[in-house]
Amino acid sequence: MKKTCLLLLIFTTLIYGCANMGSPEGGLYDETPPRVLSASPADKSTNVKSKHVAIHFDEYITVENATEKVVISPPQNEMPEIKTSGKDIVIELKDTLKEDITYTIDFSDAIVDFHEGNPMGNYTYSFSTGEKIDTFEVSGYVVDAMNFEPVKGILVGLYSDLSDSAFTTKPMERVSRTDGNGHFVIKGVGNGTYRAYALQDVDGDYRFSQKGEMLAFDHHTFSPSTTPATRQDTLWRDSLHIESINIVPYTRFIPDDITLLAFTEAQTDRHLIKTDRTSEDHFTLYFSYGSDTLPTIKGLNFDATDNLICEVSERKDTLTYWLRDTALINRDSLLIELQYLETDTLGMLVGKTDTLELIPKLPFERRQKLLDAEHEQWEKLQEKRKKRGEPYDSIMPPKPLEPKYQAQTKLTPDAIYTIEMPVPLDAYSVDSIHLYAEVDSTWYRAPFEFRQKKGSLRQYELIAEWREGTKYSLEIDTLAFRDIYGRVSAPYKTGIEIGGADSYSSLLINISSEDSADIIIELIGKADNIVRSVTTENGHADIYYITPGIYYLKAFADANGNGLWDTGLYSEDRQAERIYYYNKEIECKEKWDVTIDWNLNAVPVMKQKPSELIKQKGEETKSIRHRNYDYMMKHKEQYAPLLQQYRDMPQKNNQSH
């Protein structure tokens, strides 16, 4: 122990001797964090009447992102004034002090030294206006209910009023904010029974008052307490070698595992957000929420009867109207009278009428010039071909319809081949579509079904009994597709290869769950993208023809049976549909059947989502010590003796897990 202290003293002396308060290229940083020398009123004082707080440090300091990081409890209606002056932080509370209550000013990691930016670490100052000061703490995490991503910077508050209406009618009693890991600590909590809530407080009133505010609620109640506990304190000799592991006693504040699942309520108020006519052949209406009742459109400078084809999005909130008549396409201005349903101030759907002018991005004159230029280039090309004696056309052919054929041509045996049209079709001929299969070097006609995709205006599906390990040829004749403007498709041919069973893996999943709702399983790729989705039957789900690779599993309880994940609604006491992650990666190999036994409720929420999938990473502030070490490694000859001492000195592992 004496040796360690001596080395620390030597090292500190050397550091101060060569420290440079600027660029690290000028020397080493000062490693000593700011330290509180005094405060007025003193920290944890009682019977405080002053709204003026001054905290004095041993060096010049600054407060970073005070409005985001510094949180005061109980929450203040009027923003307090927080200033730094040399070695002091001065706080002026604007609200009238409440009687017999504990105030906490949680600076989080906002306090850093002025010259080096060396963080002090989490710091909280507190005082009481009464005879005693409350010292309990409660902590936990807030994650997004949809994907278990940590929610950074959301307000977390406590209520001793356990009625459901408190969250919408009263400000939170004690508050904190989450860090980059979604973690929060609420300090200065007194005896009592509480509920915890989270809120992305847009209007700053510390209660849920706007539909667009992200929120989280939990009906579980708790009473804060403490218990003796111990933890391992690891001292590192360097980044690879442990000096010692000590067992350190500490006071554990309970609960420290509150988990809140945050969601944003669906926007059910219906309003017309915007309209646009980016292309001359269609215009689009964007609503904040869908409706089964489509708007009524009346043309004011044209006849809209039978001249509009409506394309409806999945949620019926985006409506695209295609113009049938080419004469209308050439018009720079379309005037319409739009009658639709809108939510009024009482939350009721009522009829509304708007008059709209729809103007294309490119006016007709500009489009015509582009067409003329294109025609001129074509004529020059034909003239050159004629002079060279090559075949040429005397009339410029019309532009063909250009369907978007599926790019992927190596398919699984259960795949559906898709074709998307750029504009709605007027007609198509199944007789002009041919599918051939190669068997023993001979091509045979293969049966298939061609249909419009359900719920889609411009997407089509080719469904065949694909045979494993077989090659196919898809051949589409000229004129197979004709759009509403009379344009027809050109011939098309592509090869399709169906992989053999030996090229894939299968995943057999056995589910046990406390949820009574249908469980929908999603196979997830490394980018957290959905690769496949299946519904469990009798607690079992099979996924076949999986391309070898690393995958993950996600599930949700489909409470309303619509096949989609749905958010919650506080007024109806409805949580978002529950999400689950299988907490391990799954390696799928060729020819392998992987069996998974998955108890959805066995692993706590915060340990479910694999770390590889988490996008919101906690802030990793590189310590001054590590920056000094990196600097000395770059200048080994100059700092060789000091570097050796630096390596020999144990360093405390301050990582939080």
Image: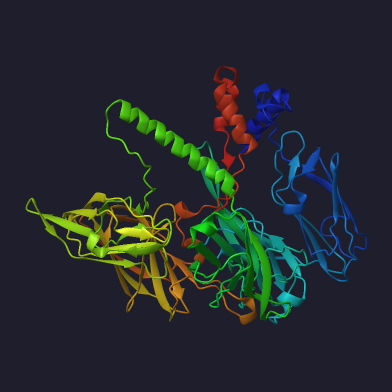
597 and 385: which one is in front?
A: 385
Could you say which quadrant of the image residue 288 lies in? bottom right
- Point 58% across, 73% down: residue: 295
- Point 82% across, 59% down: residue: 44
413 and 430: which one is in front?
A: 430
Tell me if 161 is positioned left or right of 563 in this view: right
Residue 160 visible in the current orientation:
no
Could you say which quadrant of the image residue 163 lies in? bottom right
> Furthest-front residue in view?
394
Residue 23 visible in the current orientation:
yes
Colour scheme of this structure image? rainbow
> Furthest-right residue in view?
49
175 and 447: which one is in front?
A: 447
Q: Position of residue 432 (x, y in %)?
A: 24, 59
| Count of marks overlaid on the render | 0
- Point 72% across, 34% down: residue: 116
- Quadrant of the drawing holding the N terminus: top right
Q: Position of residue 175 (x, y in %)?
A: 73, 64
Q: Position of residue 192 (x, y in %)?
A: 72, 77
Q: Position of residue 395 (x, y in %)?
A: 36, 42
632 and 378: which one is in front?
A: 378
